[in-house]
Image (cartoon, helix red, strand yellow):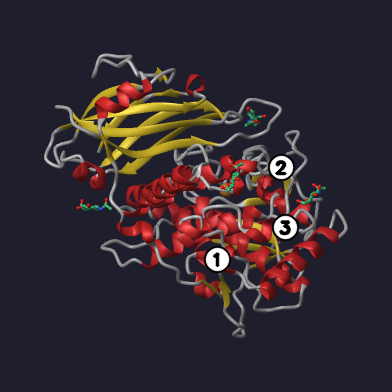
Amino acid sequence: MASWGTITRAAAAAAVLLLMLRGIDPAASAPVSIDPINCLDSGLKCCPPPSYKEIVDFKPDSQPTPLRIRRPAHTLDAEAAQKYEKAIALMRALPRDHPWNFIQQSNVHCAYCSGGHVQLGTKNVTIEIHGSWHFFTWHRAYLYFYERILGKLINDASFAIPFWNWDDLAGMSIPTIYRDNTSSLFNPTRYPTALNFTNLGGCEGDGTPGSLDKQKLCNLQVMHRQFAAASNSTSIFFGGALRAGGGSFPGGSPIENSPHSPVHVTTGADMSQISKSGYDPLFIAHHSNVDRLWAIWEGIPGKSSKVIADPDFLDASFLFWDENLERVRIRVRDVIDPRKLGYVYQDVPLKWMDIKTRVEDETSILQAQDLARPYPVGKLNFPLRLRSAAKVNVRRTASRGETLVVSDIELDGRDYVWFDIYVSRVDGGGRAQAGCFIHMERRSDKKIPIITKMQIGIADVIKQIGAAADDQIVVTLEPKVGGDKVTVGGVSII
Ligand SMILES: *[C@@H]1O[C@H](CO)[C@@H](O)[C@H](O)[C@H]1NC(C)=O
Ligand SMILES: *[C@@H]1O[C@H](CO)[C@@H](O)[C@H](O)[C@H]1NC(C)=O
Ligand SMILES: *[C@@H]1O[C@H](CO)[C@@H](O)[C@H](O)[C@H]1NC(C)=O
Ligand SMILES: *[C@@H]1O[C@H](CO)[C@@H](O)[C@H](O)[C@H]1NC(C)=O
Ligand SMILES: [Cu+2]
């Protein structure tokens, strides 16, 4: 009689054979999965209490349940706001080691950032769900369970989390329901400036009413630019491939870099740190809006599929506690369609869709910021530490490439780093911002070595600056935060 061990070994051997027949090196390619037992502390103390409870595979609801409609947080009616407030209050009141406890739930996010959950089949390779194609998918799964737990706590099967509609003129500040310091939705570490304005990336101002109008318009332009930079390619939209045992940060989606990260870093002290951002209830509404951008993009008909067909993407899986206190393994393929998860986003106008990219007059920028040209154009030596703005002539490949790649971006994952990326014509004229790279601060007791890259679609901005037919383009990298803490290995257009 065969023991379980033999059966498992035989099954594993068959699986390896199958992979080899398909021409895939089994050692190099497999979907990420999570070790149910091993979680490293790394000084953060965000690992869940150990559990040996059997893991069940995720199944969508077998019986139809009411569709959950996620609405803008700034338009919630009093009744919906009270329900939400009550659900979070109940979550906070649970025993500290209960899997639904507010801190436990906040720490779920932290434990999936570098240094927590260990990948199955490795002893010490931890999972990082930022900076890769698992950014959108993991957060969608996380919100799914979070929402259902809240619904369970208030016994409401149609309960839906709100979204922070910061891409709408009326939603670009901390929604009122989060402001009352006696509410369960309050967090004391928010910045006073965030009460008046939510910065989606580079839209600072002096806070006066006149400046605020310009800042809001700037936000719409950021939205347009970042969506355009991401939306033309499925692989750019999602970010770089992260496979089993793989190193962290193969490359973040343009949308993860902005508007996602600036909203975190300009909102408050907890929100700006990956490991603590879940302590602010705004986190859920913020990521609900990020998830909504994915749903909007999924809904736009396109030439190519809106899903990455790679099984290493689709079969990647994560573990969560669900609303029935089961430990559930959910795969990426389970979260591709929001409707199958039982929720939709309320339709609201998208003012930023049709707004034009901004082309700035380069000479006035140089004068305004007293930005001497620090390096002769085209003569940069890579790798380059971004102590000051760097300009480089980049040749487009024969096919007049429309994807800009900033490669081998090297930094310590504990550092907050932000640089902007502009394009302009070789023979002068205005420049337009193509995107930005933003890495949020992380806590760790040891260095987090990161080598990542950034890919952005530039078809839109190249047209705006009138360079669609040019063979070469000038790319400017302009450090904003922590430039001396990052080096860039190269810039190319493919
Ligand atoms: C994991 O453990 C191996 C073997 O002990 C060690 O060589 C490697 O440096 C460790 N990796 C990390 C990320 O700690
Ligand atoms: C809460 O807000 C009220 C009114 O804005 C203020 O008077 C009070 O000091 C605040 N309490 C705390 C604990 O911050
Ligand atoms: C927010 O706006 C109000 C009204 O314009 C103003 O009085 C207040 O100073 C602003 N607060 C900050 C922190 O900018
Ligand atoms: C998408 O790609 C097409 C073809 O390269 C281009 O014409 C269009 O402007 C691009 N759209 C955006 C939003 O970049
Ligand atoms: Cu986030």
Image point (76%, 77%), residue name = 155
Q: Earlier in the sequence, mark 2 or mark 1?
A: 1
**Amino acid tagged 2:** Thr
In the foreground, 486 or 219: 219
Image point (48%, 69%), residue name = 337
Say if residue 10 shows up in the picture.
no
Residue 147 spot, x, y in % from top left: 66, 67
- Asked if the residue at label 2 sits under 8 Å from ligand 2, the reply is no
For disc 2, the marked residue is: 189
**Amino acid tagged 1:** Pro
Image point (85%, 54%), residue name = 97
For disc 3, the marked residue is: 185
Q: CA distance from mark 2 to mark 1?
A: 23 Å
Residue 322 spot, x, y in % from top left: 71, 66
For disc 1, the marked residue is: 72
Quadrant of image for the C terminus:
top left
Q: CA distance from mark 3 to mark 2?
A: 12 Å
Could you say whether the residue bearing mark 2 is in a helix, strand or loop? Answer: loop
Residue 11 spot, x, y in % from top left: 58, 59
In the foreground, 331 or 174: 174
Above-or-below relation of 424 to 99: above
In the foreground, 32 or 423: 423
**Amino acid tagged 3:** Leu
Q: Earlier in the sequence, mark 1 or mark 3?
A: 1
In the foreground, 29 or 419: 419
